Amino acid sequence: MIATLVFYMFALFCIISGVMVVTSRNPVHSVLFLILAFFNASGLFVLAGAEFLAMLLVIVYVGAVAVLFLFVVMMLDITVAELKQGFQTYLPIGAAVGLVFLAEIAFVGLSWTMAPSAQSNIQAATQADGQNTVLLGHIIYTDYLYMFQAAGLVLLVAMIGAIVLTHRKRTGVKKQVIAKQLARSAKQSVELKKVETGRGI
Amino acid sequence: MAMAEVPNLIPAMPEIFLALAAMTLLMLGVFQKAETADGVLRASRLTSNLGVLSLVLALALVFTVSGGTLVSFGGLFISDPFASYVKVLILVASGFTLVLAQGWLERQGAHRFEYAVLVLLATVGMMMMVSAFNLMSLYIGLELQSLSLYVLAAFLRDDVRSTESALKYFVLGALASGLMLYGMSLVYGFSGTTDFAVIRTAIAGEASIGLLVGLVFVTAGLAFKVSAVPFHMWTPDVYEGAPTPVTAFFAVAPKIAALALFMRVMMGPFGDLAAQWQQVIMTMAVLSMAVGSFGAIAQSNIKRMMAYSSIGHVGYSLIGLAVADVSGITGVLVYLTIYVFMNVGAFACIMAMRRGGRAVEHIFELGGVAKTHPGMAAALAVMMFSMAGIPPLAGFFGKLYIFLAAIEAGYYIIAVIGVLASVVSAYYYLRIIKVMYFDEPGVDPLDSPLPVTITVVLAVTSAVIVLFFAFPSPVIRAAEAAAQSLF
């Protein structure tokens, strides 16, 4: 009973904040609503028994991605009015497409059936008991070794891509050259001066 | 919890080797002294040559592990004759385009060692796609490939057209990936698993609406990756804007990988639903052939024309998939084999089109090439005749096997439409030959002599296209064995 109530609370807030992300006039407000949406989604994960995913969502999406968004929004001078130009003109057709899509999805959802073997398939994958952080730790580096390594390659490509597309050699930049620093002798950098007493420098 | 066993790594040897090679080349490139222009050139040449060498070695590894069907990594990865056949095609296509690319990038002053590394990583992604036996490994292979391709499209980062094409490709590609993931989630929701074999038994020939919607979304995502109509809009813009060697790469390797993945997904987990998806694939095939043949007529840019031509070729291949039997899949594999050589040859000629040191892309620039560059004109004429499907060149046999498969299965109408579309497309292929042989040359001829790599590639591809009719049986037998393993 309480779980159901909590589910509807999280779900409702998630949807409301999702709508606010799109409609609010101030981009900073949009990002803040996005963070709220992430928090509610992680609440839904906790309800579904996936506490590891819930924590991951908070740490990665709220802690890193949303903060990054906030930086970008604050650094770029975005005038929302300009972005929203054409919003009115495209609203009817956009709303129509959206409504048709929603109706279709509702139709699919209402007539949803699962394969007879689906339950046993899901149970076969989730039979072990325990905290799901521990269980994920066990399978990610064993059963899903292939996916783990491949995901690493995808990230490597992202890194190479970022460097290829943005890195440039700049002239006139002062860089630390340790070899040069070490090659300096005391004679080059220190000068001894005889100071006469009572005169100052 | 029991100790996990070390998975059998042998089936994935080519992929593992290529991934390690890519990382080694990355290190090599980074630690070369690239302070001077000379150093940059040396680093890019070294990685490019070693990249081609690793592709060749990976090809040898594919041959050593090919043979039986092996499933490894807990059912995430499959190595069967179908995968091996397609991997050979992918590696050959990547190798040829990498050989051609280095010279072009040097002449353009855009040579950097990352090019070869990205091509290798994209190739690894394609091989993972072809060997995917689970929706998750399918997706991650696809993303590895796509991400590398987005970066390659923007490789000339100071060129507005290159960056624009990359941005278009990225946004639309991300949308297509999203659609496909949504479809996969519906399939998972129906069957409770992402494993291809288990999905097949869970479906057991019975189609619920939710599953069908999922299937349609997955099809839409895959159709985007092969650029089948109505998901083809990005193709002409991206092909035109991307650097020419990248366009050549796009036109062959990723297309083959995506078509192979299409076949694997449709014949594998959704094989029992053939009656449901055949009409969809047939509609896409007919539309692609129509758009491919009529769209190319109005083009004046040769890269744009090749984009429409590739849409048309995807249409012909999809006929083979729509037939959904061994002879249809065999037809597609033979078609793709020939397609690799035709496109590599044609793009080698396009890369040779330079005037006064600048790359030119308009069809009229080819005017009178037959007088100034008779060898190149002859090679391009062979490629164009072959693409138009004129016997006895190889392109004719590619189309022949596909149309034969359609007729044997009783799909007469689609075969007739295919023949009509190839008649229409003959117009623009032959127009290039007409421009080369019968138009007057421009003020000054194209640059000569042709670079050695282009000459060699043209000689090899022309020889394959011309002599295919004499020795078709090894290819056809291998393709048949590969197609058999899919059923």
Image (spheres, coloured by chain):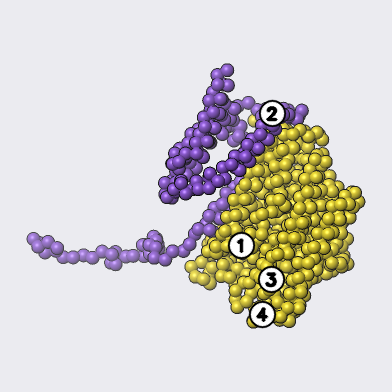
- Same-chain status of marks 2 and 3: no
Q: Quadrant of residue A148?
A: top right
The tag on residue B241 is 1
Looking at the rendered structure, the kind of residue marked 3 is Ile
Q: Which mark sits nearer the N-terminus, 1 or 4?
A: 1
Question: Residue shown at 77%/45% (left/top)?
Answer: B280
Q: How many marks?
A: 4
Distance between the alpha carbons at the discs numbered 1 and 3: 16 Å
Amino acid type, residue under disc 2 in the picture: Leu
Q: Secondary structure at mark 4?
A: loop
Q: Which residue is at the front of the view, B335 or B211?
A: B211
Report the mark closest to the observer, 1 or 4.
4
Q: Tell me how far mark 1 sits from mark 4, CA to CA.
A: 25 Å
Q: Chain of mark 1?
A: B
- Disc assigned to residue B363: 3
**Of the residues shown, which amino acid type is indicated by label 1?**
Gly
Give the image location of residue B141, x and y in percent: 67, 48
Of circles 1 and 3, which is in front? 3
Mark 4: which amino acid?
A: Gly
The hue of chain B in the figure is yellow
Q: Which residue is mark 2?
A: A110
Mark 3, other Cα within 10 Å: few <14 / some 14–19 / many ≥20: some
Vertical arrangement, residue A57 with respect to residue B335, above or below: above
Judging from the image, what is the letter of the chain drawn in purple?
Answer: A
Q: Is residue B321 visible?
A: yes
Q: Nearer the viewer, residue B319 or B188?
A: B319
Callouts 1 and 4 on one subunit: yes
Q: Disc 4 designates what residue?
A: B442
Q: Residue at x 50, y 58 (%)?
A: A166
Q: What kind of element bears circle 1? A: helix
